[in-house]
Image (cartoon, grey):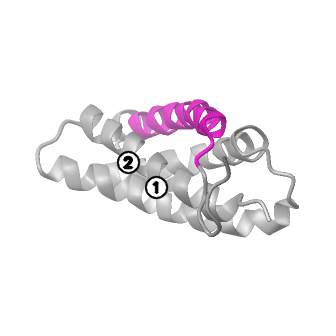
Amino acid sequence: MAAPQGTAAINPRQTARYLVSGAIAAGAYMAVTVWCRQAAGLSLLVSGIAGYVCAMPCAYLLHRYYSFRSRQPPAREAGKFIATSVIGAMLSGLIPQWLSAGGTPLAAALTVTSIVVPIINYLVLALWVFKRP
């Protein structure tokens, strides 16, 4: 059954592929963030942003070719993906900073961030970045 005109249907297979891709990207984000914080001694804000920026190319390739199976020219999507990623990077730095300031342990703050940011990203990617014409 088709979604009513002007609305987007949620594709369960696409969502499953997004979750797999997101888990891989989240693992990269968490690994880099923890290393920057604990081994390099960077602030949690900078560590979170660095983790997100390092995971970004991995996420783009996975989402473009696997999650959303896009056939659009990369130039058409790249700017949108970068804009979405910049917002995601800011959230990935700010959310753990805010949670840690309130006493939340690092692992819990990163887990919350790794859940909230991908939900927002999925919606933006599906409805705007990789939207099929």
Residue 84, image x, y percentages: 57, 63
Badge 1 crowding class, 10 Å Cα cut-off, few under 14, some 14 to 19, many 20 or more, is few
Q: Judging from the image, what secondary structure is the residue with disc 1 in?
A: helix
- On the picture, is 73 further left or further right than 110? right
In-front residue for pair 71/132: 132
Between 16 and 116, the one nearer to me in the picture: 16
Judged from this view, the residue extending furthest toward the front is 1
Q: Is residue 15 rendered magenta in the image?
A: yes
Q: Which quadrant holds the C terminus?
A: bottom right
Left or right: residue 107 versus residue 11 is: left
Q: In the rendered structure, which amino acid carries the disc numbered 2?
A: Val
* Image quadrant in which you'd find residue 3: bottom right
- Nearest to the observer: residue 37 or residue 12: 12
- Report which residue position mark 1 lands on: 120
Q: Which residue is mark 2?
A: 116
8 left or right, relative to 114: right
Position of residue 131 in the picture relative to residue 35 (left or right): right
> Residue 121's spot in the image, x, y percent?
52, 54
Q: What span is in magenta?
A: 10-36
Query: Residues under labels 2 and 1: Cα distance?
Result: 7 Å
Callout 2 secondary element: helix
Residue beneath the point at 45% across and 48% down: 119
Q: Are marks 2 and 1 in contact (CB under 8 Å)?
A: yes
**Residue name at image x 60 percent, y 36 percent:** 12
Q: What's under tag 1, amino acid-wise?
A: Ile
Picture coordinates of residue 89, whole percent (x, y): 48, 57
